Image (tube, rainbow, N blue to C red):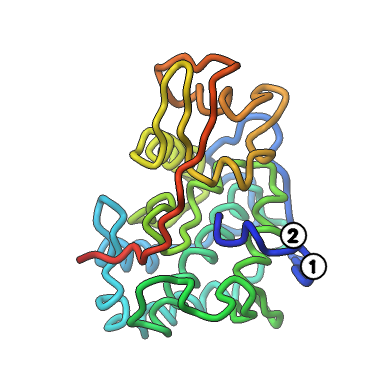
């Protein structure tokens, strides 16, 4: 996520948590994992406190903080191991990032921006097993190592310019469809302005441009082309919008 664009990798660590790379096309399945976690508690909270536009009712989350803490405790107690599938790992780490971000906001609420919190992406407050992690650890040392660029449209930094917080948990059984929907929704949103010869893009594509480049998509434009009916020309001019760090709060 953009929040850590200026965060050095120094001091970040995955502390031995398993990381598996997506190879080929990601499929949605629960059949290849030693465990299938139940994220229904997170889905229930999201459906209650996040609308279809991705606006978050943090006051509501604060009232339901005990239920949120119960889910965070569930995540903490279920430390991943090598028997987990790449699908299960992706869903787990995305949900960890999003749920603990909400907890960080709730703990510091009221506020106007996540940047009002001192070092929000460096704080070691995420407990997994007996180790603590920061949001920066989860994003940069785990999720970005999994060779799945669509994670950038799934993790939410509690800000207006971020991809919207989905109002359901990510799960292995639907992970490919969920990531695809999140990518398409963000790319075609007002955070990007697309035409054949000119692109005005979210800073996400500037900060993490290399994550979208692969053998099949050698440029950011070719990655975006997969999600739009506009045929963007290879030499299209690219500029970037300013990022709005205001809290993604439901008014």
Precedes in sequence: disc 1 or disc 2: 1
Judging depth in this view, the residue of 99 and 191 nearest the camera is 191
Q: Nearer the viewer, mark 1 or mark 2?
A: 1
- Residue at image position (27%, 83%) is 63
The residue under the point 58% across, 22% down is: 222
Q: Position of residue 207 (x, y in %)?
A: 62, 47
Q: In the image, is residue 102 above or below residue 155?
A: below
Q: Is residue 98 left or right of residue 143?
A: left
Badge 2 marks a residue whose secondary structure is loop
Q: Which mark is residue 10?
A: 1
Between 48 and 218, the one lying in front of the other is: 218
| Rendered residue at 64%/80% (across/down) | 124
Quarter occupied by residue 8: bottom right
| Label 1 CA crowd tier, 10 Å (few <14, some 14–19, many 20+) | few
Q: Are marks 1 and 2 in contact (CB under 8 Å)?
A: no
Q: Image point 58% across, 60% down: which residue?
A: 93
- Give coordinates of residue 119: x percent, y percent: 59, 77
Quadrant location of the C terminus in the rendered image: bottom left
> Looking at the picture, how far across and down is residue 232, in whole percent?
50, 17
SS of the residue at dot 1? Answer: loop
Residue 198 lies left or right of residue 167; in this view the side is right
Q: CA distance from mark 1 to mark 2?
A: 20 Å
Q: Is residue 247 left or right of residue 92?
A: left
What mark, if any, has residue 18 been given in the picture?
A: 2
């Amino acid at each position: 996520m953009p929040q850590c664009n200026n965060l050095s990798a120094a001091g970040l660590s995955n502390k031995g948590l398993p990381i598996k790379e997506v190879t080929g096309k990601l499929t949605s399945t629960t059949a290849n994992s030693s465990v299938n976690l139940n994220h229904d508690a997170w889905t229930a909270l999201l459906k209650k406190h996040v609308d279809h536009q991705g606006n978050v009712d943090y006051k509501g989350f604060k009232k339901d903080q005990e239920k949120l803490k119960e889910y965070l405790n569930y995540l903490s107690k279920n430390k991943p191991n090598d028997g987990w599938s790449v699908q299960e790992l992706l869903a787990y780490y995305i949900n960890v990032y999003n749920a603990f971000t909400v907890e960080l906001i709730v703990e510091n609420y009221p506020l106007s921006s996540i940047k009002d919190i001192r070092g929000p992406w460096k704080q070691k407050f995420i407990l997994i097993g007996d180790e603590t992690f920061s949001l920066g650890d989860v994003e940069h040392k785990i999720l970005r190592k999994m060779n799945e660029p669509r994670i950038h449209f799934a993790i939410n930094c509690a800000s207006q310019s971020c991809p919207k917080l989905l109002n359901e948990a990510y799960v292995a059984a639907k992970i490919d469809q969920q990531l695809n929907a999140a990518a398409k929704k963000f790319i075609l949103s007002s955070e990007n302005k697309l035409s054949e010869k000119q692109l005005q893009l979210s800073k996400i594509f500037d900060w993490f441009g290399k994550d979208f480049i692969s053998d099949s998509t050698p440029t950011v434009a070719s990655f975006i082309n997969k999600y739009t009916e506009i045929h963007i020309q290879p030499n299209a001019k690219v500029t970037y919008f300013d990022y709005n760090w205001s809290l993604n709060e439901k008014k």
